[in-house]
Image: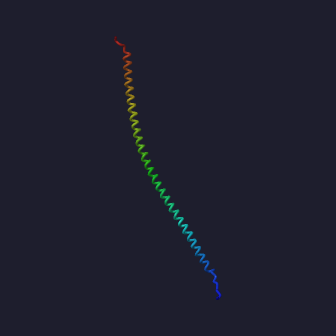
Amino acid sequence: MAPAIAVSSAQTKPQHRHELSALAEHEVLQKRNEELERELKRSLEREENMKRELQRTWERLRVAEEAEERLCSQLGELEAESVDQARAYRARLMSLMEQLSAVQKLQQASISVPSSR
């Protein structure tokens, strides 16, 4: 056998290590990128859910405000009706008091007038 000359791989090892390091770094970055993309997707889904919830809340608020307006209007109508009824009641009461007063005056007049028998 012929003598063999050994060539040091010191020159090839750093390049090989650099390639392995670059591959490992690439894999780490790729995994991190995938992780960030998943987080972004979850964040966008949460944002859409919040938008839908905000829209539902906004609709409930609009319905409540419309109901409040209807109730205020009905309350105003009822207040006006109660004022009319109170005025009518007071007028009827005054009329009855006047009639009672007139009857009492007639009774007093008939009692105070001596009978001519």
Q: Is residue 74 above or below residue 47?
A: above
Give the side of residue 85 with respect to residue 47, left or right.
left
Observer-nearest residue: 103 or 3?
A: 3
At a point 45% along the width and 50% down the height, the residue shown is 60
Give the side of residue 52 with respect to residue 95, left or right.
right
Position of residue 116 measured from the top left corner of the image (x, y, whole percent): 34, 12
Return the residue found at the far top.
Answer: 117
Give the side of residue 90 with respect to residue 41, left or right.
left
Observer-nearest residue: 49 or 4?
A: 4
Return the residue found at the far front.
Answer: 1
Q: How is the image coloured?
A: rainbow
At a point 42% along the width and 47% down the height, the residue shown is 66
Q: Is the N terminus in the top left, top right, bottom left or bottom right quadrant? A: bottom right
Position of residue 115 measured from the top left corner of the image (x, y, whole percent): 35, 13
Return the residue found at the far right.
Answer: 3
At a point 41% along the width and 44% down the height, the residue shown is 70
Position of residue 44 measured from the top left corner of the image (x, y, whole percent): 49, 60
At a point 38% along the width and 26% down the height, the residue shown is 96
Give the side of residue 77 with respect to residue 36, left or right.
left
Return the residue found at the far bottom.
Answer: 2
Position of residue 34 measured from the top left corner of the image (x, y, whole percent): 53, 66
Q: Is the C terminus in the top left, top right, bottom left or bottom right quadrant? A: top left
Q: Is residue 79 above or below residue 16?
A: above
Q: Is residue 91 above or below residue 70?
A: above
Observer-nearest residue: 94 or 46?
A: 46
Q: How many marks?
A: 0
